[in-house]
Image: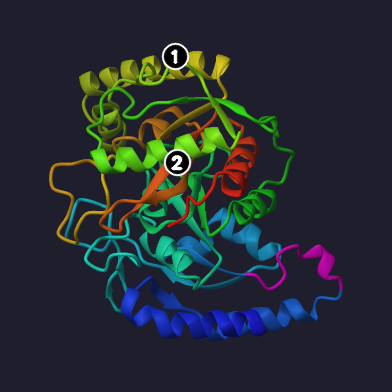
């Protein structure tokens, strides 16, 4: 009960300012904790008593939440997602108002898993569920300085009729994301990228994105630290790997556009899949900035798509993660995106764990 009480106390103290939660289930959490404690064989509950948060009003009904609860974890509340009144999704609205970035109150935390990222970043919970249809886990992870994983499309049930969205998780440490993956998967999963240094290709913009120079500089420094630490070995092809801009394709598939737009989307998707297949046949790891921009203000991103570097991998289905990379000079967290081949989620987490342990100070 101690951990749950400490969690609820932190939420009560911090959430009125940050507004990460839409609901907090105090009594339900305490009752679940009592029930877990009454379990005779706690070895059957590998997450016995671990507090976690769920994304949005329906997060408690997600497959991942059910698996975490079955492992003994305790849901303590639902986290903020974008509210009504705007088409852009990189923000959140909780029970106390708009959700604030814990590093810059004048900036958004990203979204749509906004409250999940803020709750984890401020240690209100060690783990929060998310879903990622265009970057909705990775973007807030990057902008709040935490780790965020989008799983391979189809690995877990998708909350989206188009299949673009994948289940994901936000955590303070990669080890906690590994625990999540072990608990939500019922069958064996691959471990493929354990040998260090891991051959990697770094693409600063995927050939089409306009990346903020200060964001790019932070990411380049993070990549250099990982190479110097022996975590990765950069292949001599930096800047050569490109994809077609997925914007129109993603919008067409998500929006159910007319036949010509759908056909165009299929061509872009097929070509990007071909390029990624060639890349991963020879190099197991792709690195990019998570976002082309730093956290924007609460009034919105303007004409800039914060999803420019993330949604290609929702179209292709590859697992992708955001690892804290450092800070811009004005105090905004930046994320480094790691992408591996389909089905290598466990291997991706192994690389991320090595980066976290040996790559120097990446976290804000």
In the rendered structure, does residue 193 fall within the stretch colored magenta?
no
Residue 354 percent coordinates (x, y)? 62, 42
- Give the residue displayed 67% in from the left and 80% down from the top: 33
Whether residue 95 is visible to the viewer of this picture, yes or no, is no
Quadrant for the C terminus, please.
bottom left
Quadrant for the N terminus, please.
bottom right
The one of 5 and 357 positioned closer to us in this rendering: 357
Q: Which residue reaches farthest front?
A: 228
Residue 248 percent coordinates (x, y)? 23, 28
Q: Which residues are magenta?
A: 41-50
In the rendered structure, does residue 44 fall within the stretch colored magenta?
yes
Looking at the image, how many numbered discs can be counted on the residues? 2
Foreground label between 1 and 2: 2
The one of 10 and 190 positioned closer to us in this rendering: 10
Residue 219 percent coordinates (x, y)? 38, 40
Asked if 36 appears above or below 12 in the picture, the reply is above
SS for dot 2:
helix
Q: Which residue is mark 2?
A: 222
Q: Which of the 4 quarters of the picture holds residue 17? A: bottom left
The one of 206 and 81 positioned closer to us in this rendering: 206
- Give the residue displayed 47% in from the left and 31% down from the top: 317
Q: Which of the 4 quarters of the picture holds residue 6? A: bottom right
Asked if 338 appears above or below 21 in the picture, the reply is above
Residue 229 percent coordinates (x, y)? 58, 38
* Colour convention: rainbow
The one of 322 and 223 positioned closer to us in this rendering: 223
Q: Which residue is mark 1?
A: 274
SS for dot 1:
helix
Looking at the image, tell me whether mark 1 or mark 2 is earlier in sequence order: 2
3D distance between C-alphas at marks 1 and 2: 28 Å
Asked if 295 appears above or below 116 in the picture, the reply is above
């Amino acid at each position: 009960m101690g951990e749950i009480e400490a969690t609820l106390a932190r939420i009560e103290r911090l959430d009125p300012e940050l507004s990460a939660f839409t609901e907090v289930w105090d009594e339900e959490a305490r009752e679940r904790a009592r029930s877990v404690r009454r379990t005779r064989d706690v070895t059957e509950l590998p997450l016995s008593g671990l507090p976690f948060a769920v994304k949005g009003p329906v997060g408690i009904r997600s497959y991942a939440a059910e698996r975490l609860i079955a492992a003994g974890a305790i849901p303590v509340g639902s986290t903020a997602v974008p509210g009504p009144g705007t088409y852009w999704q990189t923000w959140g609205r909780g029970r106390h108002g708009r959700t604030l970035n814990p590093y810059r109150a004048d900036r958004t935390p990203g979204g749509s898993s906004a409250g999940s990222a803020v709750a984890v970043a401020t240690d209100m919970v060690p783990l929060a569920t998310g879903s990622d249809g265009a970057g909705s886990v990775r973007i807030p992870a990057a902008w709040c300085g935490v780790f965020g994983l989008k799983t391979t499309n189809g690995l877990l049930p998708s909350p989206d009729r188009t299949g673009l969205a994948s289940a994901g998780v936000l955590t303070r440490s990669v080890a906690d994301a590994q625990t999540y993956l072990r608990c939500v998967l019922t069958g064996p999963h691959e471990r493929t990228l354990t040998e260090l240094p891991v051959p990697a290709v770094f693409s600063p913009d995927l050939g089409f994105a306009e990346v903020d120079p200060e964001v790019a500089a932070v990411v380049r420094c993070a990549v250099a630290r990982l190479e110097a630490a022996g975590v990765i070995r950069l292949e001599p092809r930096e800047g050569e790997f490109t994809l077609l801009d997925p914007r129109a394709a993603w919008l067409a598939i998500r929006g159910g556009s007319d036949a010509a737009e759908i056909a165009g989307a299929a061509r872009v998707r097929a070509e990007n899949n071909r390029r990624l297949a060639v890349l991963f046949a020879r190099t197991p790891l792709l690195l990019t900035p998570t976002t082309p921009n730093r956290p924007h203000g609460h009034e919105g991103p303007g004409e800039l798509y914060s999803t420019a570097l993330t949604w290609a991998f929702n179209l292709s289905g590859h697992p992708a993660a955001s690892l804290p990379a450092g800070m811009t000079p004005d105090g905004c967290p930046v994320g480094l995106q790691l992408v591996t081949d389909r089905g290598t989620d466990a291997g991706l987490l192994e690389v991320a764990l090595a980066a976290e342990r040996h790559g120097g100070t990446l976290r804000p």
